[in-house]
């Protein structure tokens, strides 16, 4: 997500149009380079790939359910059971614990241009097979002095602890497997803005994109931060030693330890980039090894055969009925 207080006139709470049911897909199903999704005002910010059935999962800024999308573009509502609708941003599949984790926020308040409304930040946890909600955890009370709340992205470590970035509160929350929530990290990097995209590195730390945008939605400040999960007080800014890094909205740690992420600078010419970083000295330093201009997108999903997919995003038309999942590469 790369805008603060966007001028939304309202948030859609309507039920999505039904779509034909999807046949299960094998884990390494052949997926086309472009998948068209027609007839849903989803306004997706997050995308994940579910290897269990070969589908994509898309979140909804417009507070509609998370949907499942098959490789042919057929989709259906997936999440259910919530007591009230919330917008959703980043998604994380947790195969080990059969969960779908969603960073959720009150978009209706957050984007109403009323400085008196602060929104809210939630972690919503769903059964990965059924989509039924299992836990709905309000994280906002952990940062009572924040000016606003925007749960933006979520990651999970090897022990099942979930980490939720709050871009506006400038903190990261932690939720253990039992649903106990705590304040994990307060951003004191000095980089204007707050934590946005993040992912867990199997060597025991989070890699977190901290960024700020101006009133034209252009990244003005950004950096990448390494946060050890056992010692978050030891967080350090990663020294990126080559030109080309321009901040990440969403990001993913690859199986080889590299990071791929998306720079989403709205409609700026050349401002939307797909970038790969390689870490050095256990991610004390890093360098850009691949970069490519792409259509505006927010984050990236990686399939088991190491293909990358993004959902194209146009924040100028939040109520668009048609969206495209597109394969991207550095070729």
Image: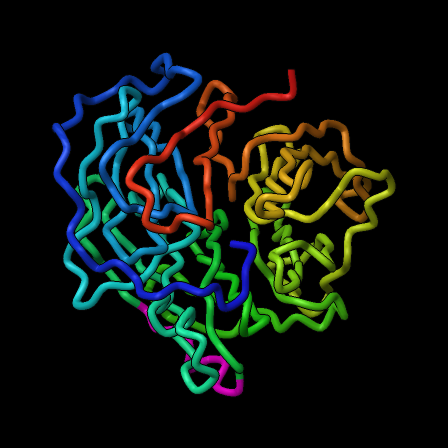
Residue drawn at point x = 77 percent, y = 34 percent? 288
Q: Is residue 141 magenta?
A: yes
- Residue nearest the viewer, comparing 42 with 171: 42
254 with respect to 80 (left or right): right
Say which quarter of the image contains residue 167. bottom right
Residue drawn at point x = 54 percent, y = 60 percent? 3
Q: Mark yes or no: residue 316 visible.
A: yes
Q: Position of residue 177 (x, y in %)?
A: 36, 59
* Above or below for 312 versus 73: below
Quarter of the figure with the C terminus = top right
The total of numbered circles placed on residues is 0
319 with respect to 215 (left or right): left
Q: Mark yes or no: residue 205 visible.
A: no
189 with respect to 75 (left or right): right
Residue stretch rendered in magenta on the structure: 137-145
Q: Position of residue 147 (x, y in %)?
A: 53, 82
* Above or below for 137 versus 262: below
Q: Position of residue 283 (x, y in %)?
A: 75, 45
Q: Report the coloring of the rendering.
A: rainbow
Residue drawn at point x = 32 percent, y = 49 percent? 319
Q: Position of residue 24 (x, y in %)?
A: 20, 22
Q: Residue furthest right?
A: 241
- Residue nearest the viewer, comparing 309 with 17: 17
Residue drawn at point x = 28 percent, y = 46 percent? 41
* Above or below for 209 versus 93: below
- Residue nearest the viewer, comparing 129 with 40: 40
- Residue nearest the viewer, comparing 315 with 140: 315
Q: Is residue 330 magenta?
A: no
Say which quarter of the image contains residue 48. top left
């Amino acid at each position: 997500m790369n805008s603060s207080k966007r001028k939304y006139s309202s948030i859609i709470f309507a039920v999505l149009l039904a779509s034909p049911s999807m046949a299960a897909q094998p884990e390494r199903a052949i997926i086309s380079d472009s998948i068209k999704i027609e007839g849903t005002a989803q306004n997706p910010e997050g995308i994940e790939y579910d290897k269990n059935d070969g589908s994509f999962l898309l979140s909804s800024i417009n507070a509609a359910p998370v949907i499942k999308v098959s490789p042919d573009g057929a989709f259906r509502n997936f999440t259910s059971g919530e007591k009230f609708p919330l917008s959703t941003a980043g998604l994380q599949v947790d195969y080990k614990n059969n969960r779908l984790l969603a960073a959720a926020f009150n978009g209706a308040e957050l984007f109403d241009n009323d400085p008196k409304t602060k929104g809210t930040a939630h972690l919503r946890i769903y059964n990965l097979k059924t989509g039924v909600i299992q836990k709905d955890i309000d994280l906002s009370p952990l940062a009572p002095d924040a000016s606003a709340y925007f749960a933006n992205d979520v990651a999970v470590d090897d022990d099942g602890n979930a980490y939720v970035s709050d871009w506006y509160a400038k903190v990261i929350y932690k939720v253990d497997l039992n649903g106990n929530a705590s304040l994990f990290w307060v951003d004191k990097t000095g980089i204007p803005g707050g934590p946005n995209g993040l992912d867990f590195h199997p060597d025991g730390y989070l890699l977190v994109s901290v960024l700020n945008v101006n009133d034209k939605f252009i990244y003005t400040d950004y950096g990448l931060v390494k946060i050890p999960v056992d010692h978050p007080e030891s967080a350090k800014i990663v020294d990126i030693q080559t030109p080309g890094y321009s901040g990440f909205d969403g990001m993913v740690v690859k199986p080889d330890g590299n990071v791929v992420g998306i720079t989403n600078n709205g409609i700026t010419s050349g401002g939307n980039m797909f970038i790969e970083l390689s870490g050095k000295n256990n991610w004390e330093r890093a360098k850009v090894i691949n970069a490519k201009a792409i259509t505006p997108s927010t984050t990236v999903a990686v399939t088991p055969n190491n293909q990358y997919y993004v959902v194209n995003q146009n924040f100028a038309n939040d109520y668009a009925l048609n969206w495209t999942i597109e394969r991207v590469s550095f070729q």
